[in-house]
Image: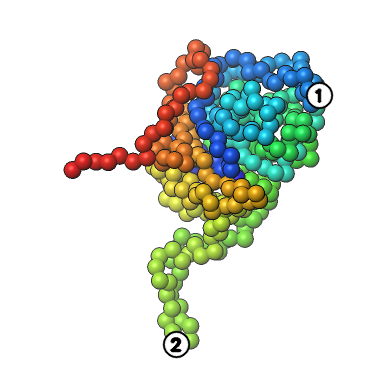
Amino acid sequence: MCTHFHLSARDGSLTVGRSMEYGQKLEPAFYLHRRGEPLFQPRWPDEAFAAMAEAAPLAGDYGYAGIATKNVLPFAPQLAPLTDRILTDGINEAGLSVSLLWFPDARYEPWRGKDATVLAPLFCNWALAHCGSVAELRERLKQVNFWLPETLASLMPFHAAIVDARGESVVVEFVDGAKVVHANTVGVCTNGPSFPWHRTNLGNYLNLTPDDPQPGMLGSHHAQEPGHGGGLAGLPGNATPPARFVRIAYLKQFSNVPADWDEARQLATHLLNSVDIPRGTVRGEHGYQDYTQYAALKSPTRKLLAFRTDASMHYRALDLSRIDFATVKSGVLDTPPLPDFTVVNA
């Protein structure tokens, strides 16, 4: 489970927020990729990947930074050589932000030849390396297919939420073996069902308001709300994707428009906190527990990437404007844990 949204401030700055939920410990870390450096797709002798044996490496026009998750594929050992480079979140030097979110209904595209095929889990890497804007992404998507062998496709179903530095936003889904690009006019994305379903579902909550309800008479009894916030009665509070989509969409709509990046960043952290899932509160079969493993903040306009873990609310950040992507060494950065709080001596 995941939640994604973006905010626009009055000064034109953009902020992207994203939470990552999963049951297997992910160990998130920053990853840097040098501009133009090839990223080789897997080449194994097993039958499922025989078609990729001669595939060209992925290379592009942009350097990028992202969040790698070392244990993202415990059930897919075939992709082990790539696990520290498969990005679920990232931003490139042009300000394009890409996030992959779990989407159980995903059906990737069919094989279309080694020169036009990219392994679906590398969507984020591919987009960040090749596209500087949503407009460019739309054109480049026509040139490639995103494929994965059936043995893995059901274990790694994703869709992508994308925002560029101009504020254009789309959701890319794979439906019945075809790419579908949805304009994200709401600025929110979660998981299944499909994005159009979530957008339509928002109409079921038009009664929500940030204003306190007015007192009324019930018979001879004068009734009034016991405290502020009654206008949000009916706002869904559970952890399902539809509930999180509605919760973020309406809270974002009702919140004061931030003046700048600093205010937007503060608002984004509050919105992310509203969908945080503590360990033990969401349980599935065989003891499986989804919980919020990390939350990320990105600024397409300021070229910033930050995240905090479930163990600490302290964000660590990269400023892409300070990185020379022509010479930086590609790979995972050693990111030591940060203290969750600081004791101030009297």
Residue 131 visible in image: no
Q: Is residue 177 left or right of residue 328?
A: right
**1 vs 2, front mark:** 1
Q: Is residue 184 left or right of residue 256?
A: right
Estimate the x, y position of residue 47 in percent, counting from the top left. 81, 24
- Residue located at (74% from left, 20% from top): 44
Q: Which amino acid, by three-letter code, is at mark 2?
A: Ser
Given residues 228 and 11, the one toward you in this image is 228
Disc number placed over residue 220 in the picture, else none? 2
- Residue located at (70% from left, 44% from top): 104
| Among the two numbered marks 1 and 2 on one chain, the one whose residue lies closer to the N terminus | 1
Estimate the x, y position of residue 92 in percent, counting from the top left. 54, 25
Q: From this viewpoint, which residue is outermost toward the front?
A: 286
Estimate the x, y position of residue 183 in percent, counting from the top left. 64, 41
Q: Is residue 174 left or right of residue 82?
A: right
Reading the image, the residue beneath label 1 is 47
The local secondary structure at tag 2 comes to loop
Q: From this viewpoint, which residue is outermost toward the left?
A: 346
Which quarter of the figure has residue 70?
top right
Given residues 204 and 272, the one toward you in this image is 272
Name above or below for residue 20 compared with residue 126: below
Given residues 34 and 61, the one toward you in this image is 34
Disc number placed over residue 141 in the picture, else none? none
Q: Which amino acid, by three-letter code, is at mark 1?
A: Glu
The local secondary structure at tag 1 comes to helix
Name above or below for residue 277 compared with residue 210: above
Give the alpha-carbon distance from disc 1 to disc 2, as whole Å: 78 Å
Residue 147 visible in image: yes
